[in-house]
Each structure stands twice: as structure tokens, then as C-alpha cells.
Amino acid sequence: MSLYFSKSHEWADVNGNTAKVGITDYAAGELGDVVYVELPEVGARANAGERLCEVESVKAASEIYSPVSGVVTAVNTALEDAPELINEDAMAAWICELEIDGIPEGLIDEDTYKAGL
């Protein structure tokens, strides 16, 4: 498994041709208390750098951009009833899983990501 990060604070945990996608702890902290997660539809096409879904917090609503391209194969339905899981552990609270086309250029490793914060 390989963990990749986007400069817009999303992560992709890649295992073969699948990737779980979520937002980083930093993004969750900036959002504040998450109160709603609009999950993408299973079967929907996601394109790297384009809107994947939306997360709403007590502060604002923020669009989440997909760090990878592919087809949504699963969503984390636990977030429907407990969106606060993102605040508790954003790196464990994946939003969706994709069957991916590959790793796009521009994603960075964890050390590079953390150095840029």
C-alpha cells in the first residue's frame, strides 16, 4: 500500500488498482466540527483534481477533490450517521474507494506533504 497526498489536503491510500480516499487531519482541523458528508455515488466517475463530494462543518461547506481518477466502487456509509468520525481520525475515516486508472502526477508522499504545512 502507498499513501499519496494532494496539495488540496486529500489523501489516497493505494493498494494495487484500488484506492481509499479521504481528507487529511489538517483539512479536518481547518473545517472544524464536521456535521455532514455528501458521499459520492457508487458507479460514478471521479477525475483527479475535480469535485468528488462535499463536507459540511459548523464553519462552512467545502468541496472535496479527488486525488486520483477512477470509478467509485464503495462509500463509507458510517459517515452518514457519524460524520464526526472525520474529526476523530481523518486518516481512518475514508470517504470512498475507487478502482483507479493509475497515479496522477502531482501527488506527494507523506513527508513532503507534512513539510509543506
Image: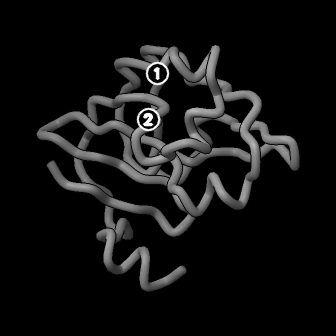
Residue 48 in the image, given as x and y percentages of width and height: 45, 49
Q: Residue furthest front?
A: 88
Q: Quadrant of residue 80?
A: top right
Q: Earlier in the sequence, mark 1 or mark 2?
A: 1
Q: Residue furthest bottom?
A: 115
Name the quadrant of the C terminus.
bottom right
Side of 72 relative to 13 (left or right): right
Q: Nearer the viewer, residue 71 or 95?
A: 95
- As drawn, the label of residue 94 is 2
Side of 105 relative to 8 (left or right): left
Marks 1 and 2 close (CB-CB < 8 Å): yes
Side of 69 relative to 34 (left or right): left
Q: Going 16% across and 41% down the picture, which residue do you hit?
A: 15
Q: Quadrant of residue 42?
A: top left
Q: Going 42% across and 47% down the picture, which residue do you hit?
A: 91
Image position of 10 with respect to 80: above or below: below
Image position of 78 with respect to 15: above or below: above
- Label 1: which secondary element: loop
Mark 1, other Cα within 10 Å: few <14 / some 14–19 / many ≥20: some
- Label 2: which secondary element: loop
Residue 32 in the image, given as x and y percentages of width and height: 75, 51
- Count all numbered tags in the image, as a single digit: 2
For the residue marked with disc 2, what is the amino acid?
Answer: Trp
Q: Residue furthest right?
A: 59
For the residue marked with disc 1, what is the amino acid?
Answer: Asn
Q: Going 49% across and 44% down the picture, which residue do you hit?
A: 89
Q: Going 76% across and 31% down the picture, which residue do you hit?
A: 35
Mark 2, other Cα within 10 Å: few <14 / some 14–19 / many ≥20: many
- As drawn, the label of residue 76 is 1
Q: Nearer the viewer, residue 27 or 104?
A: 27
Side of 18 relative to 66 (left or right): left
